[in-house]
Image (cartoon, rainbow, N blue to C red):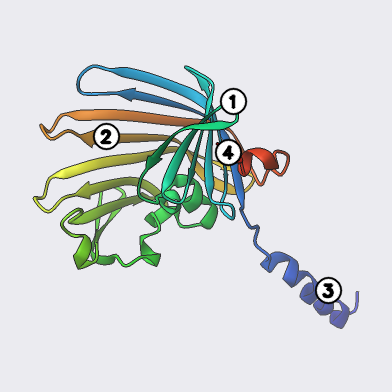
Amino acid sequence: MHKSIKIGAIFLLLPLFSISQEFIRIKAAYSIKIKTSTGISQLSMGNIFYDKNIDKIVYENKYPREEIWVTKDTISYKLLGGGVVNTIQNINMNKLTVFYLALSGNLNDFGLTNSKFSIEKVEKDKGLVITTWLPPTEYRKLIHKILISNKNGQLSGIVMIDSEEKVISKQFFRKYIIANGLLFPTEIVQISYSTEGKENYQITTFRDIQVNDFKKDFMYDYPITY
């Protein structure tokens, strides 16, 4: 092949290699195991649907009872038989969930780079890179600082500390897989602490992860009707 033709062919291929895949939707089967410091144990199982453009988190619970939970903006809705039977007002946390952060490519730092948080220091310890983040002044009565640990460029853990230097909660992200090009943890362990300092555990596992599934539009934008 003539040299100029070869060069032309390379330039024609360059745009193909520069196009990155956009991740919009994620669907997965989940199980959530909860064990409280008082000895109470709970198990929930079902499917989760999330589309970052619609920004509804839809839990299709299968066990221990069939029901739908939808979180949109600052309200979580419980639906039975297609209609709302209960609502809970809360803080809008959808964009701080593993679903949104993974789809947006911001999971490795928990999205803090694009927030008002600032880095205080970065340390290395036993193969981990640990970054200490400070919140804006107005939030420091609730959260004094957040420690983010990374291993091999993947989010490994999050520790939240209050103004009294007490640990509020810990989260560990484990067993990453690549699903259709998306890196996603299949196990999240969360430890929260009671006012007495006792530990409560929640272990969430994911399987059958599907990315950019466009077969069940209804579930990703589940209607909230009364």
Q: Nearer the viewer, residue 81 or 203?
A: 81
Cα distance in 3D space between marks 1 and 3 = 58 Å
**Image-based side of 139 in relation to 111, left or right:** left
Say the numbered circle drawn on residue 9: 3
Rendered view: 104 above or below 179: below
Cα distance in 3D space between marks 4 and 3 = 55 Å
Cα distance in 3D space between marks 4 and 1 = 10 Å
| Residue annotated with mark 4 | 225
| Residue annotated with mark 1 | 81
Say the numbered circle drawn on residue 72: none
Amino acid marked by disc 2 = Ile
**Image-based side of 190 in relation to 193, left or right:** right
Farthest-out residue, front: 226
**Few, some or many residues within 10 Å of mark 4 (<14, 14–19, 20+):** few
Labels in figure, total:
4
Tag nearer the camera, 1 or 3: 1
Assign the N terminus to one quadrant of the image: bottom right
Q: Residue at x 53, y 46 (%)?
A: 56
Say the numbered circle drawn on residue 191: 2
